[in-house]
Amino acid sequence: MKIGVFVCHCGTNIAQTVDVEEVAKAAAKLPKVKFAATYKYMCSSPGQALIVEAIKEKALDRIVVSACSPNLHEKTFRKCLEDAGINAYLVEMANIREHCSWVHRDKLEATRKAIELVRLAVAKVSRSRPLEKTYVPIEKKVLIIGGGISGIQSAIDIAFAKYPVVIVEREPSIGGRMAGFDKTFPTLDCAACILTPKMVTVSQNKYVTIHTYSEVMEVTGHVGDFTVKIRKKARAVDLNKCTGCGACFAKCPVKVDSEFDMGLGKRTAIYVPFPQAVPNVPVIDREHCLWFQKKACGACKKVCPFGAIEYDMQDEIIEEKFGAIIVATGFTQFDHSVYGEYGYGRYKDVITGLHFERMVNSSGPTGGKIARPSDGKSAKDVVFIHCIGSRDEQKGVPYCSRVCCMYTAKHALLLKEHDKDAQAYVFYIDIRAAGKNYEEFVKKVQDEYGAIYLRGRVSRIFEKAGKLIVRGADTLSGAQIEIKADLVVLATGLVAQDDAATLAQMLHIPYDQNRLFTELHPKLAPVETITNGIFLTGACQSPKDIPDAVATASAASVKALGLLIQDRLEKEPLIAKVDTDLCSGCKACVTACPFNAIEMKEVEVKKLKRKKSVAEVVKGVCTGCGNCTAVCRMSAIDLEGFTNRQIIEEIEAL
Amino acid sequence: MTQYAIRNTQYAKDWEPRIVGFLCNWCSYAGADLAGTSRMEYPANVTIIRVPCSGRMNPLFVLKCLMNGADGVLVSGCHTGDCHYSQGNYYARRRFAVLKRFLEYIGIDPRRFQMSWVSASEGAKWARLICELVSEIKEAGPNNMGTIKDA
């Protein structure tokens, strides 16, 4: 056996805390190590060429690369070994950057630890076996969870490449949050005008299937072969028969607060959430429908000319296979009721940005009039407060929601456009307007639309003589400010959906302390997740404005398509393997396997001239978790890439 | 290969504990990676061995480490419900709850074996955990079961 050790400087990332030459010298002295070298950047082309050359010249048959995390470059170096003509799985990485040079300062200590990590990797690789990749077929279909702007864009991109795609949206219509917006910053395009055509395009595309009013219940399987259970909630309206004529909701006697209009307007019990809904088919809200509550009324069924109303429709559960999944579940508003001092809930005229969007919309509940919800009078002095929930570690989330500075500026502009006599006051902490034409937009709102920007926080809001008294500080002038406002708009931050963690657990993707889904790499793999075949787009990963949501949607689509265009999928051979001679057929592994990947089979025992029952790993199903290995009393089942022998060897090398 | 020896309990003042950390690839290993990318400093006493899942961990690996003279062993996996392989961490949790009591029973300071759940986004938690772990093992003193070959 001839092991080669390659120690990376990573520029100064490793070399400044770890004496790489010393590491290489120590490595060269280890048994079986025939060659050790250092290089500035091992992952670069010349770095890889160095490895290939050494393998060929010195006839090396095992390689240790002492560099960064294997999660970053293990694949790179496996490929490198393949290029050199030896088996790709005969390489081990010693993580001397993330786990050493970046977390320790003392050069002596760090170097000692780096040498130890290399020694472990050498020990492990000495027990590595050549492995052959396996291949599995790919289901050439993509699932998109969420039908907002991100999901819609992803679907359009995938359908453009002529691959089938399914959108699952839990609301009765696709469109998501954007459908509720009035205008969009900084260009002031009307949101509906740019979104509706996309909604129509996606719904008419023959490669796209849309399940609205549906939810993903269960996801099993792995990249190329996900099995997904989808619950299609009963609409009580037949999608095929309904023409969207609207006769039913014209006759419905029930009036309840409209979710789409943020409770500022009313809807009926049978309703389409908004006029441009796709599909333009109503849904019955069973909680409020008189038929479902009291078996009374039935007006909608009577007036429907097409017999589309079906009260006894049941939820339907369908199961479909997908090769890749794009998660586009978006965001929800921060619950600002924690800020008691702002009186939300107590004062009707304290609203959020999303309320304002509906209010300012000409087809919205007030017909575009900026009216006080309390008395319907038009609001003249409007106070906007930034960072509600954002950048507040005590009561909210620590991050910046990215879009609030911009949407508040837009609101201030729209306020003036709707009413020349109105005045906007904006309390801010910092103005974050990083984006194309964003800074210019904010400047325009201040200079041309006369919005007064006050740097400081509001301490209290209270009601007095029909006005909202807003007390705050202008930290730039040092003055205490008191504004008699008609309306207060809170710029609430963007947070993860309430059930984000449940979905993440279903998909086996990680999420952070804010329940935002975690990308594979914050810079180099922003739409991928650690779970192969699952991609992220939009605000479920972090707060995003529309351009960013659309950009990540297209990025996720390309990643999904990159998988789908392959004839077959390469599968890592790092799976369990049974030594049938040792196996006693106790079935402990069968019960322990979370994936039902182990079956029993009969084998002939030649010596004893009889048959015995042994475990067998189903290659396509095994995910390589290794749970079976720990329960095996005979150590008959082992995990390739992390064999008992390899781990013991590492322990021995400590 | 192992050289058993009884280590002198009167250990040198500059004694530094040697701790082995078995980290699951998807959560804790990635969390330790994040501590690195975020440049969070922590003591260099822990040597990390990567395993695919905490469920891969055979309790014998822990015993082997202690027999070889490791002063402490850490097994770290994904939080409840977050296991990349659905249930591996549940198996680990049960398995190692038993081991911990067993270690106590056979007279090994239970502080020497610890479990933790660190997610891929908890770099800070990882760094903090190591600081605490190292000071706890320092209190426990050197493991006199054997000795690890010197570097």
Image: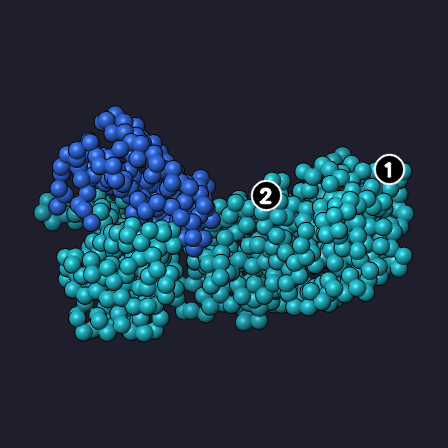
Chain colours: A cyan, B blue
- Vertically, is A196 above or below A608? below
| Label 1: few (<14), some (14–19) or many (≥20) C-alpha neighbours in 10 Å | few
Dot 1: what SS? strand
- Vertically, is A135 above or below B9? below
Are circles 1 and 2 on residues that touch, CB within 8 Å? no
Residue A640 visible in the picture: no
Q: Which mark is residue A393?
A: 2
Residue B138, picture quadrant: top left
- Residue at which label 1 appears: A464
* Three-letter code, disc 2: Glu
Q: Residue furthest front?
A: A478
Q: Which mark is residue A236?
A: none
Q: Chain of mark 1?
A: A
Dot 2: what SS? loop
> In this image, B108 relative to A264: left or right?
left
* Three-letter code, disc 1: Lys
Front-lying residue, A118 or B27: A118
Residue B26 x/y as whole percent: 40, 50
Residue A31 x/y as whole percent: 14, 57
> In this image, A258 relative to A140: left or right?
right
> In this image, B10 relative to A536: left or right?
left
Residue drawn at 24 percent across, 35 percent down: B142
Q: Chain of mark 2?
A: A
Residue drawn at 80 percent across, 38 percent down: A462
Front-lying residue, B59 or A392: A392
| Label 2: few (<14), some (14–19) or many (≥20) C-alpha neighbours in 10 Å | few
Residue B114 x/y as whole percent: 34, 36
Distance, label 1 to label 2, CA atoms, is 31 Å
